[in-house]
Image: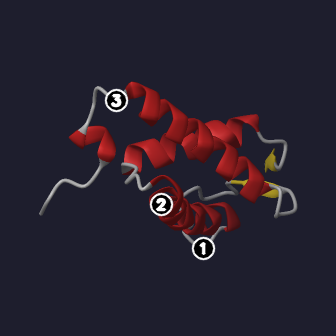
Amino acid sequence: MAIRYNLWLDPDNTAQHRAVEADLERYFMERFADYPHIRLFGADPYDYDAPFNRLYDVLMARAAEYCERTWHYVASPEQLNRCFFRAVGRSTKFVQE
C-alpha cells in the first residue's frame, strides 16, 4: 500500500498543512450549521447509531473528498479527526446530555 497523505509525504510543508487544517475546521463549522442542535453521547457513547456518531462518519468521508477536490491534498485520518473535534469544541450546535 502506497503512502498517500500529504502530511507524511511532505512533512516540512507546514504552511500548506496549516492552511488545509484551518480550512477543514471552517468546513466542519459550516456543515454543523446545516443541522439542528446535536446531542453529544447519551447513555452509551459507543452506540454507533447515535446521531453524533453517524454525523461523524458522514462528515469525515465528505471532508476527505472536499480536501482532495479543493486542495488536491490527501488529509490523514488524524488531521481530519483533530479538525473535526476542534470544530465541535468551538461550535454552539452541540448539547451535552
What amino acid does circle 3 point to?
Asn
Q: Is residue 85 above or below residue 46?
A: above
Rendered-image quadrant of the N terminus: bottom left
The percent position of residue 66, horizontal first and vertical second, equals 54, 61
Label disc, if present, on residue 78 of the rendered structure: none
What amino acid does circle 1 point to?
Asp
Contact flag, marks 1 and 2 (Cβ < 8 Å): no
The percent position of residue 78, horizontal first and vertical second, equals 40, 44
For the rendered model, the colour scheme is secondary structure
Q: Which residue is mark 2?
A: 64
Q: Badge 1: how crowded within 10 Å, few (<14), some, or many (20+)?
A: few
Quarter of the view holding residue 26: top right
Q: Which residue is mark 3?
A: 13
- State which tag comes first along the sequence, 1 or 2: 1
What amino acid does circle 2 point to?
Ala
How many numbered callouts? 3
Q: Residue at x 76, y 53 (%)?
A: 30
Per the model, the C-alpha gap separating discs 3 and 1 is 38 Å
Q: Secondary structure at mark 3?
A: loop
Per the model, the C-alpha gap separating discs 1 and 2 is 21 Å
Q: Badge 3: how crowded within 10 Å, few (<14), some, or many (20+)?
A: few
Q: Residue at x 53, y 66 (%)?
A: 57
Q: Is residue 9 left or right of residue 7?
A: left
Quarter of the view holding residue 23: top right
Q: Secondary structure at mark 2?
A: helix
Q: Nearer the viewer, residue 37 or 43?
A: 37
Q: Residue at x 73, y 58 (%)?
A: 31
Q: Is residue 10 left or right of residue 26?
A: left
Q: Which residue is mark 1?
A: 49
Q: Nearer the viewer, residue 56 or 70?
A: 70
Q: Nearer the viewer, residue 38 or 33?
A: 33
